Image (spheres, helix red, strand yellow):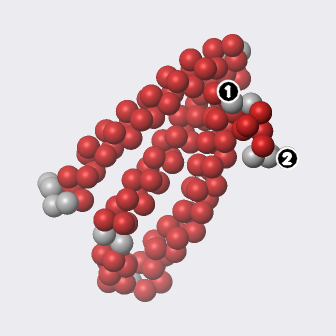
Amino acid sequence: MFRLSEFRLNRHAGQWAFGLQRLTGLLLVLYLAPHVLLNGTALLYGPEAYNELAGRLSTPFGHGVELLVIAAVLAHLGNGVRIVLMDFFALSRQQKRITTVFGAATLAALAAAAVFLIPRWWGGP
């Protein structure tokens, strides 16, 4: 069983990556239900109801949540690829370096997404 006290005892990159993987997985599962319900309004109540609900979510708070979801997806994806590489290619001795590289790549992808999306949210093309 997972315990939070493990983070105090094992402060290495793999432990933090493990915690981040679990946290992002949980956040994405929690996001899935409202996402399905929102998209289901189009099927149940028609496109007008969907557009109204989607319009209510087009607020700075809604855009912030959207950016957090993108961050969670990128972190979960990058960490998952890191785990696969370490498992299949026996790279556990390189764990700190690989974690740093994938963390930097995740932050770069998040910055690119923010640069692309933020101008569109505030009236850009």
Q: Which residue is mark 1?
A: 12
Viewer-proximal residue among 49 and 24 = 24
Residue 47 in picture, x, y percent from top left:
34, 80
- Which mark is first along the chain, 2 or 1? 2
* Residue 3 in the image, given as x and y percentages of width and height: 80, 46
Decide: is 39 above or below 17.
below
Q: Residues within 10 Å of mark 1 (few under 14, many from 20)?
A: few
As drawn, is 53 to the left or to the right of 78?
A: left
Distance from disc 1 to disc 2, alpha carbons, whole Å, reads 19 Å
Residue nearest the viewer, comparing 78 with 96 = 96
Closer to the camera in the image, 10 or 105: 10
- Tag 1: amino acid: His
Task: Tell me what residue is drawn at x 30 percent, y 75 percent.
Answer: 55
Task: Please indicate, yes or no, whether residue 89 appears anywhere in the rendered image.
Answer: no
Q: Residue at x 72, y 38 (%)?
A: 7
Left/right placement of residue 16 relative to residue 107 reads right
Q: Which is in the foreground here, disc 1 or disc 2?
A: 1
Instruction: Indicate the secondary structure of the residue bearing disc 1.
Output: loop
User: Residue 6 placed where, x, y %?
Assistant: 77, 39
Query: Does 104 sit above or below residue 41?
Result: above
Q: How many marks?
A: 2
Residue 109 in sight from this viewpoint:
yes
Look at label 2 and name its amino acid: Met
**Residue carrying label 2:** 1
Image: 9 above or below 54 = above
Which residue sits furthest right?
1
Q: Using residue 8 as the reference point, say whether residue 120 is left or right of it.
A: left
